[in-house]
C-alpha cells in the first residue's frame, strides 16, 4: 500500500508540473449523461480523444469526488489511479494520434452543479469558474486545455435544457425522459461548460451577422422579457462591429437561474445569470441587466475565444469585458454616462489604494475591483495614447493570432507595440505593474475629454455656500444635483421635486427629516416608477408623520418591489408597528415574514427577512430552523450570514 501511495504521489507531481498540454493534446470530448434530480445525481460516461505530442509516462484528467465505475483506453480496460481529485492512467505513451479514453462514472456534486427547486419545479444549473466543472464532469481544471465538446443529456420530460453549442434536432422522448443533444464546433476550456435545466420559454432573435440569439425566461415572466433583455440585440450587433472580429460561436443563449452565485457567468455561447435581473418596467429603472448582459457577452471574445494562461493575467478577461461593456453602454446612454462610470471607478480604485489594499494588476490575488475596473482603465488610457485606429487593429490582431488559444499580458502589449512602433514599458509600469493605480492621471484624462466631468468636479457642497442653492435651481447635470443633495439635503425645495427620476430617488434617500412644507411633494415620491424610491419614501414618511401612517400603508399595500420583495418586507414590518392600521392580522403578517426565511426563496429575500425579524425581535423556532438550514446553503454569502446571525442570537440570549 505504501508503494502505491508513493507511486501515485510521484505520478501526480510529474503530471502537474510537466504541464500535460505540452505532451498530450485532448481534442474532443463526447458525453452521454443522465440527470437524476431527486437524487441530485448525474451519471453516465465521457470519452476524450487525444493525441500524444511527445513521449510521456501518464495522462491525467481532473475528477473531483466522483464514483468511477470503469476506464477504457482505446476501447480496452486499463489500470488507473484515482484519489478523488485526479484520475491517472500510467503507460508508456508514444507520439500518436486518435487515442481515446472513456470514463464511466456517477456523481452527487457539492460544487459546480446545483440541484435547486423553484416554485416546486427543478432548476438545475452549473457554475464552473472558481468551482471547477470537474466536480461533475471528468475534465480539465487547466484553462489552457481546450476541447470541442458534445453532450447528450437525459432529463425528466417537461423541462427545457440549455447547454453549449447547437441543439442537434429536437429532443427525443422515452419512458418519461427526454434526450437533448448539443454539439460545439470549436474548442473551449472546461470551466466554460454550461448546463441549465428548468421550466423555460424562449424568445428568438437574429443578429445582423446571422447569429441566432435565444433569450430564455420563466413562463410567468413573459411580461418582463422586454425590460429584462432590453438592448440585447443592439449590444450584440455593436460589439461585433466595435471589436472587429466575428462572434466566434454557433449561437448565443442567455438563461436566468434561481439563486445564482454571482451576477452572471459567460459560459461559451450560453450565459447563465441571476434571475434577480429579471425585472419589470419599474424595476428596470433601478437595477437592470444591461451592464451584466454586455459584460458576459464581451467575454465570448475575451476569456472564451482567447483565455488568460493563469490568474496573473486575469485582467485580460475581466478588464476587457468591463471595458467593452462600458462601450456598449455608451452606445445606448451616451458619453456623459460613460465618463461618469469611469470617474466612479477611478475614485473607487483611489480609495482602495488609500486603504492599503491596492495591488499590481498582475497579482493573481488582486481584488475584483482591480481586475475589472483597473483592467478597463488600462484600455481607456492606452486607446487615448495610441489612437482609435491602432487600438482597434491591435485588438483584431490579438484575437486573430490567439483565437481558441491562451494568452499572457505581454502577448497583447506586443500586438500594440508592433503597430504603434514604440516601446510601451513606461505605460505598462504605470498602468499595469505598479501597485498603486494612477488615479490623478485617470481623472485628468476624463477632465480633458468631458465638460460633464469638469462640471461635476466643480460642484461641491461639503462646505456650504450660496452657489449650492443655485446648483439645484439651474441646469447642472442630474449627477451634480445628486451630489449636492447627498451633501446638503436641507437645500431641497419644492422645485427640486420637479427634477428627474434619479434626482427624486436621491431626495428619498438623503432627505430623511422631511420639512412639513415639503410633505405633499414628498408624498408624490410614492408614485414614482422606482422601487428604491418608494421603499425609502415609505419609511421616511411613516417615520416623520405618525398620524398619516395608515394612509401610506394603504397606498403601498400591493407593491412588492424586486424579487427580494424589498417593499413588501418593509411594509409588513411597518404594519406590525402601526397598531391602528389592520389591513391584515398581525399573526398573518408575522407568518408571511417568517415564511420568507425558508429555503424555497432566494438568498437575498431570505437574508432581508431574517434581518427584519431580528429588528423586531421575532425570530421564532421556525425562523431558527430555517436559519440552521441556511448554514448548508450553496451560496457562501448565505452561509456566512446565517452563522453570524445565529451567533448574535446566542449572544443576545446569554
Image (spheres, helix red, strand yellow):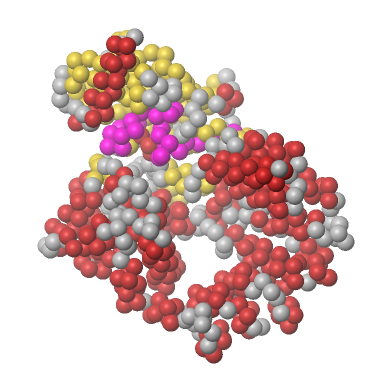
Residue 15 in view of the camera: yes
Most extreme residue toward the bottom, as rendered? 466
In the picture, residue 175 is in which quadrant?
Answer: top right
Q: Compared to 260, does 489 lie above or below? A: below
In the picture, residue 82 is in which quadrant?
Answer: top left
Q: Is residue 128 magenta?
A: yes
Q: Left or right: 534 with respect to 28?
A: right
Q: Compared to 326, does 264 lie above or below? A: above
Q: Left or right: 383 with respect to 87?
A: left
Residue lying at 72% horizontally and 73% vertically, measured from the top left: 523
Residue 139, image x and y in percent?
35, 28
In the picture, residue 328 is in which quadrant?
Answer: bottom left
Q: Compared to 180, does 297 lie above or below? A: below
Judging depth in this view, the residue of 654 and 89 nearest the camera is 654
Residue lying at 72% horizontally and 43% vertically, measured from the top left: 653
Judging depth in this view, the residue of 561 and 572 nearest the camera is 572
Q: Which residues are magenta?
A: 122-149
Most extreme residue toward the front, as rendered? 654
Residue 236, image x and y in percent?
39, 55
Residue 631, image x and y in percent?
60, 37
Residue lying at 20% horizontally and 66% vertically, measured from the top left: 386
Quick one: quadrant of the N terminus?
top left
Q: Is residue 77 magenta?
A: no
Residue lying at 67% horizontally and 62% vertically, measured from the top left: 535
Amino acid at each position: 500500500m505504501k508503494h502505491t501511495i508513493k507511486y501515485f504521489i510521484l505520478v501526480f507531481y510529474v503530471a502537474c508540473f510537466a504541464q500535460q498540454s505540452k505532451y498530450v493534446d485532448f481534442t474532443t470530448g463526447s458525453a452521454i449523461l443522465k440527470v437524476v434530480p431527486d437524487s441530485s445525481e448525474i451519471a453516465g460516461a465521457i470519452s476524450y480523444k487525444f493525441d500524444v505530442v511527445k513521449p510521456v509516462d501518464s495522462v491525467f484528467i481532473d475528477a473531483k469526488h466522483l464514483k468511477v465505475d470503469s476506464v477504457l483506453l482505446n476501447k480496452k480496460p486499463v489500470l488507473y489511479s484515482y484519489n478523488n481529485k485526479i484520475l491517472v492512467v500510467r503507460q508508456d505513451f508514444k507520439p500518436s494520434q486518435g487515442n481515446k479514453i472513456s470514463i464511466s462514472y456517477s456523481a452527487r456534486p457539492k460544487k459546480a452543479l446545483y440541484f435547486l427547486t423553484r416554485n416546486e419545479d427543478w432548476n438545475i444549473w452549473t457554475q464552473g469558474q472558481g468551482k471547477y466543472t470537474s466536480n461533475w464532469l471528468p475534465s480539465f481544471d487547466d484553462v489552457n486545455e481546450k476541447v470541442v465538446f458534445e453532450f447528450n443529456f437525459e432529463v425528466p420530460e417537461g423541462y427545457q435544457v440549455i447547454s453549449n453549442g447547437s441543439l442537434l434536432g429536437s429532443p427525443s422522448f422515452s419512458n418519461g425522459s427526454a434526450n437533448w443533444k448539443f454539439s460545439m464546433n470549436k474548442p473551449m476550456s472546461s470551466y466554460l461548460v454550461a448546463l441549465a435545466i428548468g421550466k423555460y420559454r424562449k424568445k428568438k432573435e437574429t443578429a445582423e451577422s446571422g447569429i441566432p440569439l435565444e433569450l430564455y425566461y420563466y413562463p410567468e415572466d413573459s411580461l418582463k422579457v422586454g425590460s429584462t433583455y432590453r438592448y440585447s440585440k443592439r449590444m450584440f450587433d455593436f460589439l461585433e462591429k466595435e471589436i472587429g472580429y466575428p462572434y466566434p460561436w454557433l449561437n448565443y443563449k442567455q438563461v436566468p437561474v434561481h439563486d445564482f452565485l454571482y451576477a452572471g457567468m459567460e459560459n461559451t455561447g450560453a450565459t447563465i445569470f441571476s434571475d434577480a435581473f429579471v425585472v419589470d418596467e419599474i424595476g428596470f429603472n433601478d437595477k437592470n441587466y444591461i451592464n451584466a448582459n454586455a459584460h458576459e457577452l464581451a467575454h465570448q471574445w475575451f476569456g472564451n475565444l482567447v483565455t488568460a494562461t493563469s490568474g496573473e493575467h486575469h485582467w485580460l478577461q475581466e478588464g476587457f469585458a468591463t471595458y467593452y461593456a462600458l462601450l456598449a453602454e455608451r452606445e445606448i446612454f451616451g458619453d456623459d454616462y460613460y465618463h461618469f462610470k469611469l470617474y466612479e471607478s477611478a475614485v473607487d480604485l483611489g480609495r482602495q489604494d488609500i486603504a492599503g489594499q491596492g495591488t499590481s494588476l498582475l497579482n493573481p490575488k488582486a481584488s475584483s475591483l482591480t481586475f475589472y475596473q483597473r483592467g478597463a482603465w488600462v484600455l481607456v488610457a492606452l486607446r487615448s495614447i495610441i489612437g482609435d485606429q491602432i487600438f482597434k487593429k491591435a485588438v483584431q490582431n490579438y484575437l486573430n493570432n490567439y483565437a481558441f488559444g491562451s494568452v499572457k499580458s505581454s502577448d497583447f502589449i506586443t500586438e500594440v507595440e508592433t503597430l504603434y512602433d514604440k516601446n510601451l514599458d513606461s505605460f505598462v509600469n504605470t498602468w499595469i505593474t505598479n501597485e498603486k493605480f494612477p488615479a490623478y492621471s485617470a481623472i485628468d484624462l476624463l477632465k480633458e475629454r468631458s465638460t460633464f466631468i469638469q462640471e461635476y468636479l466643480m460642484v461641491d457642497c461639503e462646505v456650504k455656500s450660496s452657489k449650492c442653492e443655485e446648483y439645484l435651481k439651474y441646469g447642472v447635470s442630474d449627477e451634480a444635483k445628486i451630489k449636492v443633495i447627498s451633501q446638503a439635503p436641507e437645500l431641497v425645495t419644492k422645485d427640486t421635486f420637479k427634477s428627474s427620476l434619479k434626482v427624486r430617488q436621491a431626495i428619498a434617500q438623503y432627505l430623511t427629516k422631511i420639512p412639513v412644507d415639503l410633505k405633499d411633494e414628498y408624498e408624490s415620491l410614492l408614485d414614482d416608477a422606482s422601487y428604491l424610491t418608494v421603499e425609502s419614501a415609505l419609511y421616511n414618511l411613516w417615520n416623520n408623520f405618525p398620524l398619516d401612517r395608515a394612509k401610506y400603508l394603504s397606498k403601498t399595500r400591493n407593491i412588492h418591489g424586486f424579487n427580494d420583495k424589498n417593499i413588501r418586507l418593509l411594509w409588513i414590518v411597518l404594519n406590525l408597528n402601526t397598531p391602528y392600521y389592520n389591513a391584515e392580522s398581525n399573526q398573518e403578517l408575522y407568518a408571511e415574514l417568517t415564511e420568507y426565511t425558508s429555503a424555497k426563496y432566494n438568498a437575498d429575500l431570505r437574508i432581508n427577512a431574517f434581518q427584519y425579524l431580528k429588528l423586531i425581535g421575532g425570530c421564532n423556532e421556525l425562523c431558527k430552523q430555517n436559519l440552521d438550514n441556511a448554514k448548508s446553503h450553496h451560496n457562501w454569502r448565505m452561509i456566512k450570514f446565517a452563522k453570524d446571525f445565529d451567533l448574535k442570537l446566542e449572544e443576545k440570549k446569554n
